[in-house]
Image: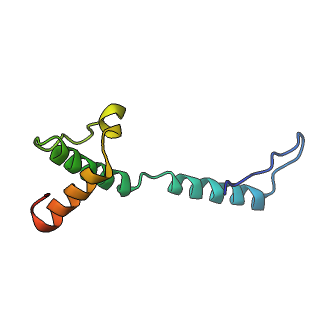
Amino acid sequence: MPIIIPKQKEGDVASPASTDESKAIAAAAAAAAKPSPVPKRYNTILRDFMAYHHQTTMYPEGHTFADAELLEITPDHIIRYFTMKLYGDGD
């Protein structure tokens, strides 16, 4: 849920409490904006999967895949990948 801070009317002087409150809200928003490690881990797993799917070596970090490449993936491809990860053989 977004945090809504009411705007002050012209001529109103901000009270110290509302200023401190605004600073706390801004600090919380900045902390929430820090990048999460999840996208990096997600990208690593995706690159590993796509390397398996395309039968090639690992893609470099930061590689982006075209929509067409991602749209060709089927549930069977994912099942084969995880079967290979679990049992060492995708078939």
Quadrant of image for the N terminus = bottom right
Give how far across and how far down residue 76 sits, in percent: 27, 53
Task: Identify which residue is drawn at 29% across, 35% down.
Answer: 69
Q: Nearer the viewer, residue 74 or 70?
A: 74
Q: In the rendered image, which quarter is residue 9 located in?
A: top right
Is 46 displayed left or right of 20 in the figure? left
Give how far across and how far down residue 70 sits, in percent: 33, 39
Q: Nearer the viewer, residue 77 or 7?
A: 77
Give how far across and how far down residue 81 sits, in percent: 20, 56
Q: Nearer the viewer, residue 39 or 81?
A: 81
Give how far across and how far down residue 60 sits, in percent: 18, 40
Query: Which colour scheme appears in the figure?
Result: rainbow
Is 58 displayed left or right of 10 in the figure? left
Quadrant of image for the C terminus = bottom left
- Tell me: residue 15, above or below residue 61: below
Is 79 displayed left or right of 7 in the figure? left
Task: Identify which residue is drawn at 11% across, 41% down.
Answer: 56
Is 36 displayed left or right of 52 in the figure? right
What is the total number of numbered labels drawn onto the structure image?
0
Q: Nearer the viewer, residue 67 or 41?
A: 67
Q: In the rendered image, which quarter is residue 89 located in?
A: bottom left
Task: Identify which residue is drawn at 74% across, 52% down.
Answer: 4
